[in-house]
Amino acid sequence: MDGRRIKEFDKILKMGKEGQEALNHYWLDYALYTSLEYWIMVTLLIAPLIILFFKIDKGKIFFMGFFGYSIHMIFGYIDLFSRNLGLVNYPFPVIPMLPGLSIDSSFVPVTFMLVYQWALNHQKNYYIYMVLTSAILAFVFKPLLVGLGLFKLYGNTNYFYLFVCYLIVIAIAKFITNVFLWMEKKFNNRRKSS
């Protein structure tokens, strides 16, 4: 193995660790946990989960949960990618090690889950309502967060970039969910015919 390459890799990891330690100190030094902005982010984490608990269709709970988890994972990866490239970030993280926790893990997945559930229950077109929801999140919700200082865009990143990211998320989550539904149906039909 090339020792120089490994040393360079170790140096990069050390820089990442130092960056995380700086974020932790920033979080503590500015006592972010005592600010109104911090508690707004906590609310964006907890309130959607409480709403989901009461609003989720219990007859479709695993289906909707799988869809929501897919949204959460895909959005989390896109958000991590965007933060690592320095395109976006959250100045008031609920937990410094997970800056986008409240938005990635709760608000966005629950929003998409409830819209999808509504579209299913009312026989509405998934894509129309999810594109509308994506537009509202990208062009209304995120500018509101920016205005409140809860979300930052860097460089040439704009709201259209965020909109495209949401479209990618809803397309992949729908595809993955449909693949698993297809496999479940195929497996159940094969088992019934045996």
Image (spheres, rainbow, N blue to C red):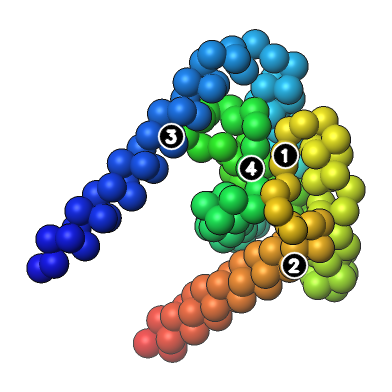
**Which amino acid type corresponds to the residue marked 1 in the rendered image?**
Phe
Whole-angstrom CA distance, mark 1 to mark 2, is 17 Å
**Which amino acid type corresponds to the residue marked 4 in the rendered image?**
Asn
Q: Residue at x 63, y 42 (%)?
A: 89
Give the residue at mark 1.
151
Which of pointers 1 and 3 lies earlier in the amino acid sequence? Answer: 3
* 95 w.r.t. 130: above or below: above
Q: Which mark is residue 89?
A: 4
Say which element carries label 2. Answer: helix
Q: Which one is in front in this view, the residue at disc 3 or the one at disc 2?
A: 3
Mark 4–mark 1 CB contact (< 8 Å)? yes
Whole-angstrom CA distance, mark 2 to mark 4, is 17 Å
Give the residue at mark 3.
20
Whole-angstrom CA distance, mark 3 to mark 2, is 28 Å
Residue 119 seen from this side: no
Q: Which one is in front in this view, the residue at disc 2 or the one at disc 4?
A: 4
Which of pointers 3 and 4 lies earlier in the amino acid sequence? Answer: 3
71 vs 138, left or right, is: left
Q: Residue at x 56, y 72 (%)?
A: 176
Whole-angstrom CA distance, mark 1 to mark 3, is 18 Å
Q: Residue at x 85, y 35 (%)?
A: 147
Say which element carries label 1. Answer: loop
Say which element carries label 3. Answer: helix
